[in-house]
Amino acid sequence: MSVPIYHMVSGAPQPVAPYSHVVEADGWLFVTGQLATHVEYDPAKIPEGAEAQTHQVMQNLRTVLQGVGAGFENVVSVRVFLTHFTEDYDTMNRVYAGYFPEDRRPARTCIGVTALAGGGRVEIALIARRS
């Protein structure tokens, strides 16, 4: 195994805790969960509702992936965390589905949690593999 590479992506949201945006090992890209924050972390600027938050989270993930030369087409596994699982599950799924072709959707786990940083309702982490 090669030495892991720890990436901080310019233009991606500022971390809300001590972590790297991506850790790369042997072509695998382990992408830290993203919240619906913008470049400068400010919990007051997290958009309201699951739809807006899911779109912002997916945009943040796109920025992070592009920062390491990858895209959604490289994603193989996704973990979704929802604080209002029953209320937000269908909405999150509808938005999320628009980011992947029907015949190329990654494996996925969706988990209901009690809280997320900054009061977010949606957090999504992923694993990708370089072609």
Image (cartoon, grey):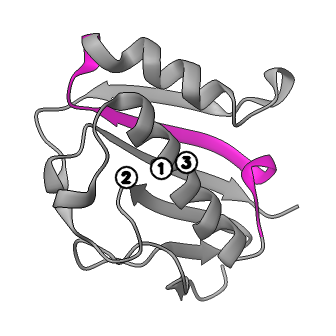
State how far apart marks 1 and 3 are (Cα): 5 Å
Q: Secondary structure at mark 1?
A: helix
| Mark carried by residue 36 | 2
Which residue corresponds to mark 1?
A: 56
Q: Amino acid at mark 3?
A: Met
Which residue corresponds to mark 3?
A: 58
Q: Amino acid at mark 2?
A: Ala
Q: Amino acid at mark 1?
A: Gln
- Screen quadrant of the C terminus: bottom right
Q: Of residues 45 and 97, which is closer to you in this image?
A: 45
Q: Are marks 1 and 3 in contact (CB under 8 Å)?
A: yes
Determine the image quadrant of residue 113.
top left
Residue 13 on the magenta segment: no
Q: Position of residue 102 (x, y in %)?
A: 80, 21
Relative to 60, is 73 on the left or the right? right
Q: Residue at x 39, y 41 (%)?
A: 53
Q: How many marks?
A: 3
Q: Are marks 1 and 2 in contact (CB under 8 Å)?
A: yes
Q: Residue at x 27, y 13 (%)?
A: 87
| Mark carried by residue 100 | none
Relative to 99, is 96 on the left or the right? left
- Screen quadrant of the N terminus: bottom right
Q: Earlier in the sequence, mark 1 or mark 2?
A: 2
